[in-house]
Image: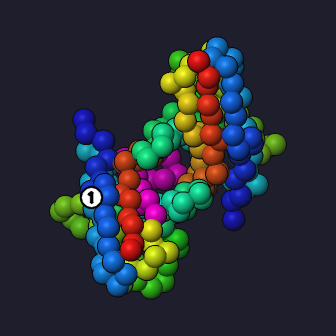
Amino acid sequence: KQEVTQIPAALSVPEGENLVLNCSFTDSAIYNLQWFRQDPGKGLTSLLLIQSSQREQTSGRLNASLDKSSGRSTLYIAASQPGDSATYLCAFNDYKLSFGAGTTVTVRA
Amino acid sequence: NAGVMQNPRHLVRRRGQEARLRCSPMKGHSHVYWYRQLPEEGLKFMVYLQKENIIDESGMPKERFSAEFPKEGPSILRIQQVVRGDSAAYFCASSQTGANTGELFFGEGSRLTVL
């Protein structure tokens, strides 16, 4: 059974600082992984999808890497803004998505 | 292009009543997934359906819960004889291809409160 861990559980940074969110998983037999953003009381917004054959994906200020051998994925958010405040979830797809508990990010203006 | 649509957004039921949650996938998507998010907990997989078929229901409680995705119309998650422990946010996701290749898109969720 896939176990997904996200560290840290919460993070508070001043505006403009770069964010580094970590996600680790126990089973390397994954098809792909997705990073999501969830705002309070809202649904999940897909940020990035990385297929198992890829090592990273980029979209604007976001970059996600995947290292299957070490069982890790990292989400980088450059030049953070207050609007980036949300909970970020990683999910590993070993046929069905297994979610981490999330990292709650607060960007202070 | 409308996203995944879920309704109702909020539902209040008394213990013992039935709850029906509906999900319309994105246009062109034939794969639907239901997840549950309990307060202060992460999202847990419940069931994976394709049109008229249940592919994987390993996350569904054995009793009181059922799901369907008919040929016409939305997917339905049905909870019979609700109990307080069923209070949670229920999210639906859809994908164009199967979960092992496709990107999943989520709805805004249906928040069930059981009194």
Structural crowding at the residue carrying mark 1, measured as other residues with C-alpha within 10 Å and reported as few (<14), some (14–19) or many (≥20): some
Q: Can you give x and y, in whole percent of width and height, for residue A19 in the image?
A: 68, 25
Question: What stretch of residues is rendered in magenta?
Answer: B88-102
Query: Which type of secondary structure does the marked residue at label 1 adopt?
Result: loop
User: Mark 1 falls within which chain?
Assistant: B
Total marks shown come to: 1
Q: In the image, is residue A34 part of the stretch drawn in magenta?
A: no
The image's colouring method is: rainbow
Drawn side of residue B112 relative to residue A7, left or right: left
Residue plotted at (28% across, 70% down):
B20
Q: Is residue A93 visible?
A: yes
Drawn side of residue A48 relative to residue B94, left or right: right
Residue plotted at (30% across, 78% down):
B18
Q: Is residue B103 visible?
A: no
The N terminus of chain B, quarter of image: top left
Residue plotted at (28% across, 49% down):
B5
